Amino acid sequence: IRSKRTNWALTVTGSNLTDHAGQIVKLRGLNSYNSIPYGMAANYEQNGGAGGLDQFAKLCSRADVLDLHCRQFGPAFNCIRVPIFSGSYPLALKRLKYFMLECEARGIWVLVTPFGMGPYGDYTSRFHAAGTDVDQANSAAMQTEVASTCTSIAGLAALHPNMLVNTLNELRVVNDATWQTLQLAWRAALRAGGYTQPIVYDGSSWAQHTTTAMASAIMAVDTQSIFSFHFYPENAGGTLESPGVPLASMVSKVAALKTAGRAVMLGEIGISV
């Protein structure tokens, strides 16, 4: 039997995440992604696209599914990362609220992540040319669209204390200054919308590149920031369109941020092939 939390407030304190009592919190759980059971343990969406959302809605209403995972993973299981697909936000957010309530009753945080996959459109394919940095002419449009989504998500977070936000999944830019500009714009939309919890930022280049300078640029504006890596190491170097970098490189990037006193999350874990 899991006890319900009475205070969901989290604070970034140095490289740690702490609760309202000052105790260190480590977020551990599931990464929900359409049809592919990768990430931290398993998935909730089975079919992808519209079918995936329908399946997700059904699972959201089934307390036994959450209870099964609670039994499987034990008391350390305290977080689920959930994608919200571009072009379907009104429907997705409506369905998400029931899921939030089920998770709240079981002491589980929900990390909501704007996605852009499949039939709902892909942010990254619509806003930059393959193999290149975000086109400067299009990055402004991307900034505006995602900021609007962040505003809507912030409104939902005001109703659900167990909600955390990841600004955007796997922004495929390699220009550090562009990454900073976009992330700070989305951060501003979340804060203006009333969101008060820490914000999770995926690194650039498929969330596999965040330098201490990039993190410092965010921290200079908002100390309540967590930097997420998607950990898909491979023996050969990856490219922008084929993610995956050498294991040593990934480890050194994470270690550099930790040494600099930044809070780090492994938002997805797998193997690039």
Image (tube, rainbow, N blue to C red):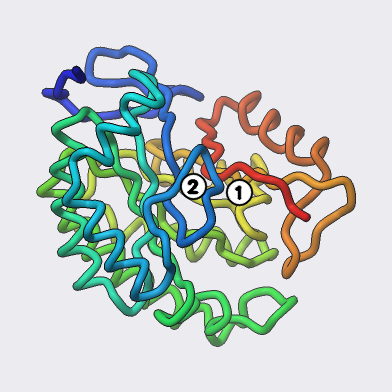
| Label placed on residue 218 | 2
Q: Horizontal and vertical percent for residue 148?
A: 29, 72
* Residue positioned 56% across, 25% down in the render: 261
Kind of residue at disc 2:
Ile
Apparent side of residue 47 relative to residue 11 in the rendered image (left or right): right
Q: Residue at x 48, y 77 (%)?
A: 118
Residue 160, percent across and down?
14, 44
Q: Say if 126 sits above or below 227 in the image.
A: below
Nearer to the camera, 240 or 177: 240
Q: Residues within 10 Å of mark 2 (few under 14, many from 20)?
A: many
Mark 2 and mark 1 residues within 8 Å of each other at the beta carbon: yes
In this rendering, position of residue 231 left or right of residue 110:
right
**Is 159 above or below relative to 135?**
above
- Label at residue 223: none
Q: Which residue is depicted at the point 20% across and 72% down?
A: 91
* Extreme-right residue of the structure: 236
Q: Secondary structure at mark 2?
A: helix
Check the picture and name the quadrant holding the N terminus. top left
Of 261 and 234, which appears nearest the observer? 234
Task: Tell me the amino acid under the disc marked 1.
Answer: Met
In this figure, what is the number of numbered marks? 2
Quadrant location of residue 93?
A: bottom left
Classify residue 29 by image quadrant. top left
Residue 48 picture location, percent across and down? 43, 68
Q: Which residue is mark 1?
A: 214
Q: On the picture, is 257 further left or further right than 149?
A: right
